[in-house]
Image (cartoon, rainbow, N blue to C red):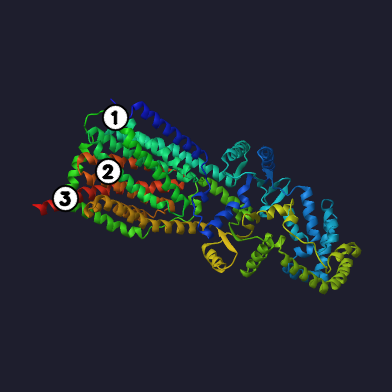
Amino acid sequence: MTRDAHGQMPLWRLISIWSLIFAVLGALTVHGVRNVTTDLRAILPRNETAFAREMDFFARQGAAKLMAIEATVATTDDLDRALQHLRSLQPKLEELGLKSLSTADPHAVVKAAEIIQERVAILTTEADLEALAPELAVGPLTERLRALRVRASRPEDSFAGTFARGDVLGLTGKPALVLQSGLGGSRTDGDLLVHADERHALLVMSVPFDPSEMDRTRPLMYAIDSARDAAAQDAVTLEGIGAYRHFRENLDAVHSDLSASMPLSILLIAILLYSLIPNLRALLVMQLPAVMGMVGSIAAVVITGQALPAAILGFSAAILGVAVDYGQHMVVGLRSGHAQSMRRPLVMAFMTTATAFGVLLTSSVPGLRCIATMVIGGLSMSLVTSLFLVPRLTPVMKPTDPWLVVSRPLLRMTQRFPRANWLIAAGLTAACIPGLMRTHFNDDLRKFDGSHPETWRILGEFERRWGGEYRSSDFLVMIDRDLDHALDRVAATRRALALPPKEIELLLPSRAEQARRLEAWNSFWRKHAAPFAADLEIASRAAGVRFTAFSASLDRYRPLDAAPELTFATWADTPVGKLLAGYVAQTDDGWQVASPLGKLNKSEIRTVGATLASGPVWIASREHIGKHLVEVVQSDLMHRGLAILIAILALVFLIERDWRVVTAQLLPSLLALAWTFGFLGWCGIALTPFAVLAAAFIAGIGIDSAIFLSQNPKAETLSPVLVASITTIAGVASLIFAQHPMIAGMGRVLGVGMVFCLLACLLVTPSLTLFFRRKPAAASA
């Protein structure tokens, strides 16, 4: 029978209104889930300039829009099979909009060669000229010419002789290396690269969309997966390497965690709740606050215009465990005929949790604000549903409590030996406090990623095998409106750090550097042109070649009045241009120039960072990002943790106006937090910054339980508190086994925290409330 007191809204109208609310929130939830982002920047702080620019830099890196497909065979004799599978895959990827980054385009190669030939003076560094000087003597020249004569006599290498007539010293060879070889010293084979070991082949393609566009990323990865399965039948190992694989695996990990954790959590919660309320209809009604809380949490993020990160989406499972408590307390109150008495503790419990997370709305970290919005939005809907919908739909039940067989002796034991309880609590606190000193955070960004361990292993082997820019995880970076100025400052910084020049400095020198190189060129050949010509003639006779054949070389090796200017645009549509595009990019703030450093260790990062501290050039390091992330989030949470404590203390005191009641309600949460993080510290578990958010949940739920017990310390009140705590533990325990490390990290903290939270409430609140109540009674007597 439905409760419908006189003067209340007709039930059909009430259901219609709530159905409309659910439909709207559900539509917003679907929209939010469809537009979930796996971009880590969506949860990271933007007010930290240095931190934000590093995150933006790595997001803009050209490699983020590259897809590398590697084929591996067991022996060199099987290489042709690897090449065949890559060539079969290439047209399928081109249908998806991908383009090869190969240097095999003859027109692009010819254009690059012409640029090098015309600008050899400004592509030759002072160090190159210094190394060249000893080679100009008769002896070295004679050996060079004899070797050249042997090469020119081979039919397959006849081009070498023609090329050497115009550049007998091979000065154009160094810039041209990029046209002749690929990553890791590989050779080209059409659009493919073949590793020096002749067992690995590589197809590198540019992708016209971001990895986060999952409607396009999934077909791309499906094509690669299908090719991988076909290649495996032919004893060829084919793997896709790139951000697109990581994005797909991260999103799949979140979806897998949600699909695995949600049903299990709901089943465990349903079993526990049925043991408390053995009425199917009442049990279903009890779930309404949880359902509305779930859709309300995601809808709140969508309404406020925030991004919904995939990792944080998994946090909604924790809200499920909390939201169901509201319906549970209300249904238990309805069964016992004390529904009105439930309203005050329900509202108070919501206010304390909302206050704790409300403070996080002021955080500079978007991830914290997003979770705060989810919690406040979700629990608001849960509270409203519990207060106004659940009472109208709950059937009349017999006022029997199956859990009294547990709650009565348990409450009697906690109240009979208060000092023993306090001694146990003090002992746990003393044991866990040293563990707090051992608490540490994980600052490795890879461990925030939900990609499979196998994927990271494959990536590591790929980086070691192929080298090149794929290994350059750290960079010197500068952004400036003037590209030339940025190039000059980055190159000067490399010189100041005593680092050798890389491709960006060698192939794209600034105007000032071009002028310096031209001056060095002219000075060198003013000194060496005449002696070189004489020695070349002697060496030619000794080597048995015609001296007059090298007239073009003699004409090249002379002082120049000027050289054609070399710019980033000069290299457009050439293999060099494709290479430089990984280091030069135009942003909203100007031109970004990046010079690869290779992977630095922590000591090197600190040294380089200290050297660059006051300059416009800065270091971009993934390891530095992880460390800075931990520092920013930890600092933010510590400052707001104090604000949360003060806000909750003030709120509860304003409501209760009795410090003894306030102590009974707040002390369990403080103890639970100390025990939780102390225990995790002793276990050596590294925390992610966002796992610390569980502290607010632990405190909020601990206060909720303590409020109900302090308001009415009876077995009838302890029963729903026990079930509420256990259902919350069930709601978050499944997250411990999540694939995504951020979700699993939050699950560990929440699971341990909720166990300690229940233990603290049992040890402290009933005995402390009874102890405080005896004091006034004794004084009155």
Q: Name the kind of residue labelled 1 in the image.
A: Gly
Residue occupied by mark 3: 773
The residue pinned by badge 1 equals 7
Dot 3: few (<14), some (14–19), or many (≥20) neighbours within 10 Å?
few
Q: Secondary structure at mark 1?
A: loop
Q: Nearer the viewer, residue 103 or 207?
A: 207
Residue 458 at what x, y percent from top left? 57, 48
Please state which amino acid type lies under the numbered disc 3. Answer: Arg
Q: Is residue 532 left or right of residue 734?
A: right
Q: Quadrant of residue 274?
A: top left
Q: Considering the image in quadrants, where does the N terminus appear? A: top left
Q: Please identify the residue farthest to the front as the structure is shown.
A: 7
Local SS, label 2: helix
Q: Nearer the viewer, residue 19 or 128?
A: 19
Which residue is at 46% across, 50% downward?
367
- The residue singled out by tag 2 in the image is 345
